[in-house]
Image (cartoon, rainbow, N blue to C red):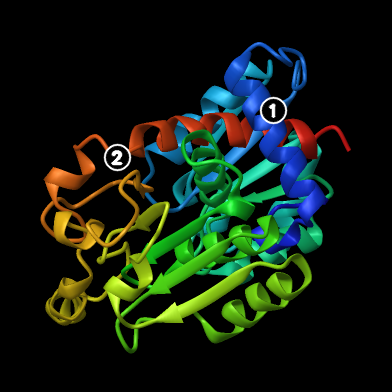
Amino acid sequence: MRHLLRTADLDPTELRELLDLSAAFRANPDLRPRALAGRTVVLYFTKPSTRTRLSTCAAVARLGGQAVIVGPAELQLGRGETIADTARVISRFASALVVRTFADADVQELAAHASIPIVNALTDGHHPLQSLADLMTLEQHCGPVDTLRVAWIGDGNNVAHSLMEAVALAGGTLMVGVPEGYGPDPAVLADARAIAARTGATIEVVHDPVEAVEGAHAVVTDVWLSMGDPDDQKARRLRDLAPFQVNADLLAHAREDVRFLHCLPAHRGEEVTAEVIDGPRSVVFDQAENRLHTVAAVLATLTSR
């Protein structure tokens, strides 16, 4: 693993090592206080962020390094400098580049020309850092992922893509419950199923939310309206996704000890009710905290190679 552009860049052993190191960082935040001593990590964000920005900055600090946050207005990318030249220049100054942007092609091009690790902190197609925190949270509250039945409910978006790949690598079962027309990208689904065939995992897509959550140890969702969604599609999306709201009635079909996950920010009253996300089955703030431990594990691992 030289870069982390999508969760499928990992193999099962690398995933296990990252999860174990993440748990070690949770138990001992000062585990590797000099891993990035005297070194810089650049964060290039073209989208707003709370958890990703703050968790990455905190992780760099705990590893002894310095985080530098920049956006298009601070770099010559905004004035036409090429992605390739930007990657080469940042590689001379920093030990890693964490990128939150739109097109997956942009992080792929950065990785092609950089001599330092590139970490995808969210693109239109993938959110690998979130998937690591999701699996860490599942293991924290539900047990080994290869023993779990997990349900994704809502839109088959970038977060769903990375969760499919992560559960496939871990050997678990993921039921992806989406309305017709809102399924995951067929190519990503095919990749996840190819991984699942090697690990013994199960990745299924269904169009009935009750079928998806039946017997689930955990139910995961995300917002229905994402950054960049056209205004003229919002009313249609809200209407189409309404039957896939995670509420008490839907969770009644899962296990009695089911846990609820959401990457946040949440829109209470849309994809989830306040009763669920603020209730005793919700582990969303442990999940948010685990973003810190998992990104620390990723940076410590990538920069040590």
The answer to which of marks 1 and 2 sits earlier in the sequence is: 1
Q: Quadrant of residue 249?
A: bottom left
Q: Quadrant of the C terminus?
A: top right
- In front of the other: 210 or 229: 210
Q: Residues within 10 Å of mark 1 (few under 14, many from 20)?
A: some
Looking at the rendered image, the disc whose residue lies closer to the viewer, 1 or 2, is 2
Q: Position of residue 185 (x, y in %)?
A: 51, 81
Residue 66 showing in the rendered view = no
Question: At x 59% / y 77%, what residue is drawn?
Answer: 188
Q: Amino acid at mark 2?
A: Ser
193 to the left or right of 173: right
Q: Position of residue 149 (x, y in %)?
A: 49, 59
Residue at the disc numbered 2: 282
Residue 205 showing in the rendered view = yes
- In front of the other: 105 or 168: 168
Question: At x 16% / y 54%, what residue is drawn?
Answer: 248
Q: Position of residue 238 (x, y in %)?
A: 15, 73
Report the Cα–Cα distance between label 1 and label 2: 36 Å
Residue at the disc numbered 1: 40
Q: Amino acid at mark 1?
A: Thr
